[in-house]
Image: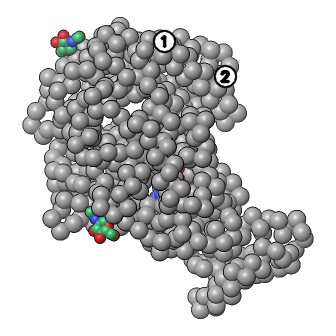
Amino acid sequence: MHTSTLLGAALQLCALLGIFAGAAAKIELTSRSNIIVQPQTSAQAAEITRNSGCIGLTAASWALVFYPGSEVYHYENQEFWSLTEILAPSCVFRPTNAQEVGNAVKILQTTNTKFAVRGGGHMGIAGANNINDGVLMVLSNITTFRLSQDQTVLSVGPSYKWGDVYGLLQPSGLAVQGGRLSPIGVPGLLLGGGISFYGNERGFACDDVVNYEIILADGSVQDANKSFNPDLYFALKGGSSNFGIITRFDIETFPGLKVWAGVYSISAEYITAFLEAIANYSMNAKDPKSAVIPAVVAGDPNIAAVILFYNSDTVGFPDDLLPFTNIPSISSTLAFKTLQQFSDETAVVVVPDLNDLFASGTIRVTSYQQALTGINLIYNIFFDRIPLLYSQMPKENITIIEIDWEPITSLWLKASAAKGPNALGLDPTQIYICYAQVVEWTGSQYNRIVYDWAAENEKTITDATQEAGIYDPFHYMGDSAGFQIPGFYNGYGLGNGAKLEAISRKYDPKRVFQNLMPGGFKLAHSEG
Ligand SMILES: Cc1cc2nc3c(=O)[nH]c(=O)nc-3n(C[C@H](O)[C@H](O)[C@H](O)COP(=O)(O)OP(=O)(O)OC[C@H]3O[C@@H](n4cnc5c(N)ncnc54)[C@H](O)[C@@H]3O)c2cc1C
Ligand SMILES: *[C@@H]1O[C@H](CO)[C@@H](O)[C@H](O)[C@H]1NC(C)=O
Ligand SMILES: *[C@@H]1O[C@H](CO)[C@@H](O)[C@H](O)[C@H]1NC(C)=O
Ligand SMILES: *[C@@H]1O[C@H](CO)[C@@H](O)[C@H](O)[C@H]1NC(C)=O
Ligand SMILES: *[C@@H]1O[C@H](CO)[C@@H](O)[C@H](O)[C@H]1NC(C)=O
């Protein structure tokens, strides 16, 4: 311990002096407490330049850096939802607090090293949360979890998955807005907007964040809230990883009793009625306690399934959900349960070791008829094009193809507007219906085929919905594909893309979070 601290100090000095970056020397970490410096060839000097961030971080805090071959590197580099996210970072950096993140941000700039940041690891886009030949910063050890004295605010670190948060809050009889499936990570969901089961009551999950603790490009630890850095506070509500690294979210709590919820499945013969029910609910939802996630899953035959939710521990089958529950079901798990139990139940659809794609789009509608037209268009285009996918790759390698809808009702947008603006810029006088194409498959050699197919679907749907006068350029980040990053923020309402750009230039004039941390939904890659 003592020796390695000394070595660490020596290395830190060398790193600061830029010795390793220029010289033909190589540092090998034979174990966490034994560092060897060896002269090497010029080819290897280039490699050192690439890894100089790892060296700098090791020098500053050796115990937080893990190299290929170590158990922690191996563990952390597979803590991702999808196979599509697994890359080969030069090292893993695992800080335990905000100051360590701040120091790292400085070192990564001094050494000009590219890096990626991973929270819960559920953004299924290669390079969004991982990196080849760079530093992978994982937030698994920033584990703040603290209720305010009056229990109205939860301070939560970026290490958590939503299921754990719900479980930890249960004994206090409280809940927060977060993921509808337990394994989704806290930070990425809140930074993309956040769709919970409580949207009709409370708006987007980010609308419940009262304060962010953020590490800025200069390495400083700052708060962003309504009265302090208010422009940054606004930008973080949907603006993703463009502004800094969040080390703590302070979010509003509310009473978390049992809820009435379940998965309700419907056979192919009722799909027409099912699509009508989606339009009906989208336009007519009146009860803020209700939520739905309708989906149609491709199969032989197709099957419809809707997640139904009602925030009540005494009332089931509320009027708002009748459009769905009036249709006969082939199976149903509707019952009273805790939020944690339900998010564990929905999590069974999360299957490891697959390749996955989500791709998103949105329609904006003013009448039931328009909503139904849009839902039918999307449904028909998507399902008509499935044989084309089957003709390019073996059907047996596709484990799921489905389309999901996400009605953003007027209840939802009013609740959101009441809390103050977020970056998404949706118009509270409108009704939006977002949709997501979902494909999961085995065999990475088929990735390109699936991406191209989904991108072509998207184009076809866009053309059709534009023609019908119901297209909206908004995309929900959590359901969006890598090919949708160009131009992404142009789809946010009220010209918010330009606002986000200005705010990012103010807080990050050196463009650290655009250039050194290139992954994910970046403004710089969003000019499209
Ligand atoms: C099966 C499944 C179900 C889903 N269900 C929902 C749902 O119910 N509701 C919903 O809204 N969304 C849902 N999503 C989408 C989800 O919100 C996004 O994928 C989100 O990015 C996941 O957060 P994460 O922390 O796990 O992601 P990560 O992949 O770790 O991070 C996402 C992005 O944010 C960046 N980032 C992560 N942490 C930080 C930080 N602390 N500071 C700065 N940048 C950071 C990463 O670099 C990356 O670019 C679902 C996704 C999946 C795969
Ligand atoms: C750090 O995270 C890893 C992985 O989640 C966990 O096993 C370990 O106990 C954590 N350590 C601390 C100090 O939180
Ligand atoms: C906002 O940030 C300031 C400055 O750090 C802090 O004093 C204040 O408590 C924060 N407000 C909230 C609501 O967290
Ligand atoms: C919406 O659903 C309700 C409940 O099933 C039904 O009474 C109503 O007629 C439906 N509206 C439309 C436009 O289909
Ligand atoms: C395709 O699916 C079959 C059947 O599940 C499986 O045996 C095969 O390994 C898959 N191919 C690839 C490339 O993963």
Q: Residue at x 60, y 58 (%)?
A: 511
The image quadrant of residue 97 is bottom left
Front residue of 319 and 211: 211
Residue 255 spot, x, y in % from top left:
16, 50
Mark nearer the viewer, 1 or 2: 1
> For the point 34% across and 16% down, which residue is it?
371
Q: Quadrant of residue 423 in the image?
A: top left
Residue 408 visible, this angle: yes
Whole-percent x, y for residue 340 in the image: 28, 47
Name the mark on residue 393. Answer: 2
Give the residue furthest to the left: 314
Estimate the spatial distance between the alpha carbons at disc 1 and disc 2, rounded to whole Å.
31 Å
Q: What residue type is disc 2 on?
A: Met
Q: Is residue 10 above or below residue 477?
A: below
Is residue 379 visible to the viewer in this orientation of the structure? no
Looking at the figure, which quarter contains the N terminus? bottom right
Mark 1 or mark 2, earlier in chain: 2
Q: Residues within 10 Å of mark 1 (few under 14, many from 20)?
A: few
The percent coordinates of residue 38 (x first, y second) are: 83, 79
Task: Name the residue that disc number 1 marks.
Answer: 467
In terms of image quadrants, where is residue 229?
A: bottom left
Q: Residue 161 or 177: which is nearer the viewer?
A: 177
